[in-house]
Amino acid sequence: MSDQALSAALEREHLQIDAGIRAFLEGLEGGSPDADGLRATLAVLRRHIYLEEQLLFPPISRGAHMMAVFGMIRGHGEIWRTMNALDDLARAGADQDTLRGACCRLLDQLADHNKVEEPVIYPAADTGLAPEVAAEVAEFLAAGRMPEGWTCARGAA
């Protein structure tokens, strides 16, 4: 993956995550929600947040993007708590309306978050990273794993 492809790869993960949540909603509406598919999608989202907070944000938060990164980290905390609530509801077999509401809340949070992240933060992935950091991000995108039990910086707040 070239350095120029980092933003595109990160945005593709956004699309994959949104599609996974929407697929769960479609299954829910059709009477056969795929709880395993939802858990897999939430795992992709958690890994994505890990990659951003541990690899992407630190090197770009030192300059002009400092306040944007701060906002992204705060947004991650809100998203993380909503993910956990949705996961708990799905495991508990919550009713359709409750699950739909939690999914819609998460999709809304992601849409608001991505409106800033994609045009402001992701271009810095293409132009503002040292080559070795860009390579590390690319390697993680290809095959990286989030450490067991990791929680985002604002996940508990």
Image (cartoon, rainbow, N blue to C red):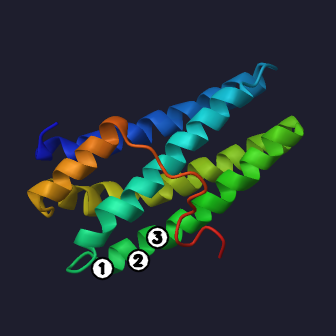
Q: Amino acid at mark 1?
A: Met
| Residue 147 drawn above or below residue 12 | below
Residue 148 position in % (x across, y down): 57, 51
- Identify the residue position indicated by label 1 in the image: 66
Q: Residue at 26%, 42% (x, y): give it.
A: 139
Residue 116 in sight from this viewpoint: no
Decide if residue 62 is on the left or right side of residue 144.
left
Q: Are marks 2 and 1 in contact (CB under 8 Å)?
A: yes
Q: Residue at 34%, 80% (x, y): give it.
A: 67
Q: Residue at 64%, 28% (x, y): give it.
A: 37
Residue 90 position in % (x across, y down): 79, 39
For the residues marked 2 and 1, what is the alpha-carbon distance in whole angstroms?
A: 6 Å
**Structural crowding at the residue carrying mark 1, measured as other residues with C-alpha within 10 Å and reported as few (<14), some (14–19) or many (≥20):** some
Sooner in the amino-acid sequence: mark 1 or mark 3:
1
For the residues marked 2 and 3, what is the alpha-carbon distance in whole angstroms?
A: 5 Å
Residue 52 position in % (x across, y down): 38, 58
Q: Which image quarter holds the C terminus? A: bottom right
Decide if residue 3 is on the left or right side of residue 62.
left
- Identify the residue position indicated by label 2 in the image: 70
Q: Quadrant of residue 63?
A: bottom left
